[in-house]
Amino acid sequence: MTSGGKCAICKLVGLLVVVGAINWGLVGVFNVDLVAQLLGPMSGASRAVYGLIGIAGVLAVLAFFKCCPCQKGSCETKK
């Protein structure tokens, strides 16, 4: 990794992935869906949050194969 900070998109994706992971952990361990409790079960707001978390998960998976431009030089393949 480079010594520079991450871009805003990387930070947002990381935050959403953490929120999703914590929510699923709470569902698995305590059967509590925190997003639904805060925003209403399957309300428009909770559906938007679930959708954003899903998109963030896809972007996190894609990050395994291609690095964010803000991390230029940290993920170049060795020749």
Image (cartoon, rainbow, N blue to C red):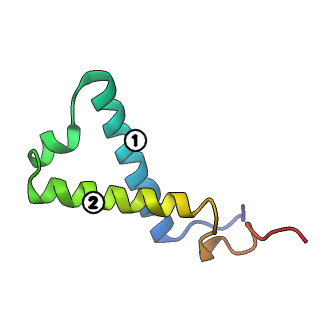
Q: Nearer the viewer, residue 30 or 8?
A: 30
Give whichever of 7, 30 is nearer the camera.
30
Mark 1 touching mark 2, by CB under 8 A?
Answer: no
Indicate the secondary structure of the residue bearing disc 1: helix
Task: Report the quarter where the N terminus lies.
Answer: bottom right
Q: Farthest residue toward the right?
A: 79
Residue 75: x, y in percent?
A: 73, 67
The residue located at (53%, 57%) in the rendering is 61
- Residue occupying the point 55% across, 64% down: 62
Q: Nearer the viewer, mark 1 or mark 2?
A: 2
Which residue is at 63% across, 69% downward? 66
| Residue 3 rendering spot, x and y as whole percentages | 71, 64
The residue identified by callout 1 is 21
- Residue identifier under label 2: 51
Say how many tags the image has.
Answer: 2
Residue 46 position in % (x across, y down): 17, 53
Q: In the image, which disc is placed on residue 50? A: none
Percent position (x, y) of residue 22?
Answer: 36, 38
Q: Amino acid at mark 2?
A: Gly
Quadrant of residue 12 in the image? Answer: bottom left
**Quadrant in which the C terminus appears:** bottom right
Task: Please give left or right for residue 3 compared with residue 57 in the image.
Answer: right
Mark closer to the chain start, 1 or 2: 1
Q: Using the image, determine if residue 69 lies above or below residue 30.
A: below
**Alpha carbon distance from label 1 to label 2:** 14 Å
Q: Is residue 48 left or right of residue 57?
A: left
| Rendered position, 29 above or below 58 | above
64 sits to left or right of 16: right
Camera-nearest residue between 42 and 6: 42
Q: Secondary structure at mark 2?
A: helix
| Amino acid type assigned to the residue bearing label 1 in the image | Ala
